[in-house]
Amino acid sequence: MDENNTSTHEIDKLIQPMKCKNSYGYDEISSRILKSSAPYVLSPLTFIFNKILSTGVLPERLKFSEVKPLYKKGDSPVFSNHRSVSILASFPNIIEKIIYKRLYCYSINNSILVNGQFGFRDKLSTDTATFTFLNEVLSSLDKKICWRLIL
């Protein structure tokens, strides 16, 4: 099996942690239904997802989402008091996670990401970025190296 292919086990590991919700996207399949039917749909999903991975083509239907207004605050009839929310189907979320994992591993294995890249990386966060920056500034000041910062 090609290392880029997925397995029923990998897909099941992505489905099981999903929150059991009754809400659904355009496909009308909620995460609750997906989780309960997982043993029956894992093989067909694996075939479909492996076809997507091998061809590099995501079916147009999986690119759709429903955009709905969500009320924030203020006068409800006023359009600017709402924000848009995209409601995705469950299947695109799964293939997105599979592709993300492949891209992330490829980036790490091939040293594509620089050390200063903190976003979307395991065990790195804005806190880590802030700590690293402050540590570098303080170390430089100890060595009497001048710093300039532009905001």
Image (spheres, rainbow, N blue to C red):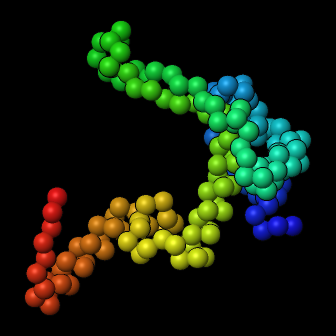
Left or right for 91, reference 133: right
Q: Is residue 148 above or below residue 142?
A: above
Where is residue 74 drawn, in percent x and y?
Answer: 28, 17
Among the 4 quarters of the image, the one containing residue 76: top left
Q: Quadrant of the N terminus?
A: bottom right
In the rendered picture of this protein, how many numbered marks are placed on residues?
Answer: 0
Left or right for 65, reference 48: left
Q: Is residue 23 above or below residue 95?
A: above
Residue ID at (43%, 73%) = 114
Residue sitting nearer the eye, 137 or 114: 114
Which residue is farthest top? 77
Q: Quadrant of the C terminus?
A: bottom left
The answer to whether residue 70 is visible is: yes
Q: Is residue 18 above or below residue 61?
A: below
Residue ID at (32%, 19%) = 80
Residue ID at (78%, 68%) = 3
Where is residue 21 drawn, in percent x and y?
Answer: 64, 32
Q: Is residue 128 above or below residue 57?
A: below
Residue sitting nearer the eye, 66 or 131: 66
Left or right for 91, reference 36: left
The answer to whether residue 42 is visible is: no
Where is residue 85 drawn, in percent x and y?
Answer: 49, 29
Among the 4 quarters of the image, the one containing residue 148: bottom left
Residue ID at (63%, 31%) = 64
Where is residue 82 drawn, in percent x and y?
Answer: 38, 21
